[in-house]
Image (spheres, rainbow, N blue to C red):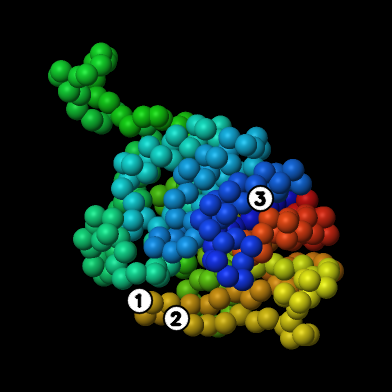
């Protein structure tokens, strides 16, 4: 059994899209999550990008989904910590978790290249690209510490409202949220770091190119390294691991028109991201009829290692088409793979 969710980037564009405005993107995201819950999808996750026509402010969205659903997990994959104030983020995340009744699964990390140069500077953080790696980790650890609910702030001797003795903490406090924070790892080293600090693991459709093995094998090795490091760290709760996959079932003429491969199999690809000195390997897209998908996905080692699979969706095609994708996977693919 695996948890199955969708991952949306929440794009909008005024041409060639059924999602033309920010209003369309956010409201359709809520509608999709509501409908996905009805067919048994376990999670609604959203990528966060700034300075772009796509989802960039996740907490109001996750709260709105939580208010209209009762079971589906709501999460991010991921929030770029280069832009975040840990204190404000801890308050927002905790309130969102309360509104959703403990269903937040928050992915955090460094993030991918953004649309503007050093975009975090516009958010009030004056760091160079060279400093960002350590700043991101330090900020994440501070955020985790705040979620513990510790009392740390010195009280005002003349407060506006009556209060008891002793130090104060951020409010509201969301019990259990600390155990539902995920780190987006791109390498064995970052996966091990996440395990040592008690975060669950998210791994996307790209990772650092660390060997000549296929993408899914390299990713599986990262997940295994994470699990071993977690065991050695001796944390008092069981971790979760998540991988993302591009899966496009082809069952209709429209599917074939949009995603048909003309008989040519998709392959992993190796390239470079901005500011990355080392190459990155991008996982292939799985496109085909359900029986073909079952056969190919059954050979994916990283999926075998993970307890959660996120399906990337083409959100610009609208709610109806994305529900068609999810329904096909839930009905014709997941049961055959033993995910259900």
Residue position for label 1: 275
Question: Picture coordinates of residue 144 (x, y %)?
Answer: 38, 44
Residue 180 visible in the picture? no
Q: Earlier in the sequence, mark 3 or mark 2?
A: 3
**Distance between the alpha carbons at the discs numbered 3 and 1:** 35 Å
Disc 3 target residue: 32
Judge depth for marks 3 and 1 and give the one in front.
3
Task: Tell me the residue at 33%/56% (across/down).
Answer: 83
Q: Is residue 251 above or below residue 332?
A: below
Label 1: how many Cα within 10 Å (few below 14, some 14–19, many 20+): few
Q: Residues within 10 Å of mark 2 (few under 14, many from 20)?
A: some
Residue at 66 percent across and 64 percent down: it is 317
Q: Which mark is residue 272?
A: 2
Q: For residue 332, which numbered disc appears in the image?
A: none
Labelled pair 1, 2 in contact (Cβ < 8 Å)? no
Q: Earlier in the sequence, mark 3 or mark 1?
A: 3
State whether residue 195 is above or below residue 278: above
Under circle 1, the secondary element is loop
Disc 2 is placed on an element classified as loop
Position of residue 174 measured from the top left corner of the image (x, y, whole percent): 45, 32
* Residue 125 against residue 158 in the figure, above or below: below
203, 92: nearer the viewer: 92
Q: Position of residue 300 (x, y in %)?
A: 69, 69
Above or below residue 198? Residue 173 is: above
Looking at the image, which residue is at 33% across and 42% down? 88
| Residues at discs 3 and 1 in contact (Cβ within 8 Å) | no
Between circles 3 and 2, the one closer to the viewer is 3
Residue 176 relative to residue 303: left or right = left
298 or 88, nearer to the observer:
88
């Amino acid at each position: 059994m695996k948890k199955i969710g969708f991952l949306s980037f929440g794009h909008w564009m005024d041409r060639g899209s059924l999602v033309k405005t920010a209003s369309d993107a956010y409201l359709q995201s809520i509608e999709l999550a509501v409908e996905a819950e009805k067919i048994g999808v376990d999670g609604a996750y959203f990528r966060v990008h700034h300075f772009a026509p796509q989802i960039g402010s996740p907490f109001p969205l996750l709260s709105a989904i939580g208010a209209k659903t009762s079971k589906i997990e709501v999460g991010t994959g991921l929030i770029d910590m280069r832009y975040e104030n840990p204190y404000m983020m801890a308050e927002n995340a905790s309130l969102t978790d309360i509104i959703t009744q403990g269903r937040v699964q928050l992915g955090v990390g460094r993030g991918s290249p953004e649309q503007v140069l050093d975009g975090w500077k516009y958010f009030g953080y004056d760091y160079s690209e060279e400093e960002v790696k350590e700043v991101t980790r330090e900020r994440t650890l501070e955020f985790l510490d705040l979620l513990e609910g510790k009392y740390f702030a010195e009280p005002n001797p003349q407060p506006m409202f009556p209060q008891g003795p002793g130090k104060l903490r951020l409010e509201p406090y969301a019990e259990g949220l600390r155990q539902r924070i995920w780190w987006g790892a791109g390498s064995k080293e970052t996966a091990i770091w996440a395990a040592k600090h008690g975060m669950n693991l998210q791994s996307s459709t790209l990772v650092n190119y660390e060997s000549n093995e296929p993408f899914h094998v390299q990713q599986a090795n990262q997940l295994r390294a994470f699990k071993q490091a977690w065991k050695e760290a001796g944390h008092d709760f069981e971790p979760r691991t998540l991988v993302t996959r591009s899966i496009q079932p082809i069952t209709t003429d429209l599917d074939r028109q949009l995603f048909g491969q003309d008989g040519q199999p998709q392959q992993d690809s190796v390239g470079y991201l901005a500011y990355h000195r080392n190459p990155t390997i991008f996982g292939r897209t799985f496109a085909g009829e359900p029986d073909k998908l079952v056969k190919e996905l059954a050979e994916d080692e990283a999926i075998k290692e993970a307890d959660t699979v996120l399906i990337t969706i083409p959100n610009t095609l609208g709610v109806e088409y994305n529900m068609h994708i999810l329904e096909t996977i839930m009905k014709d693919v997941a049961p055959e793979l033993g995910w259900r």
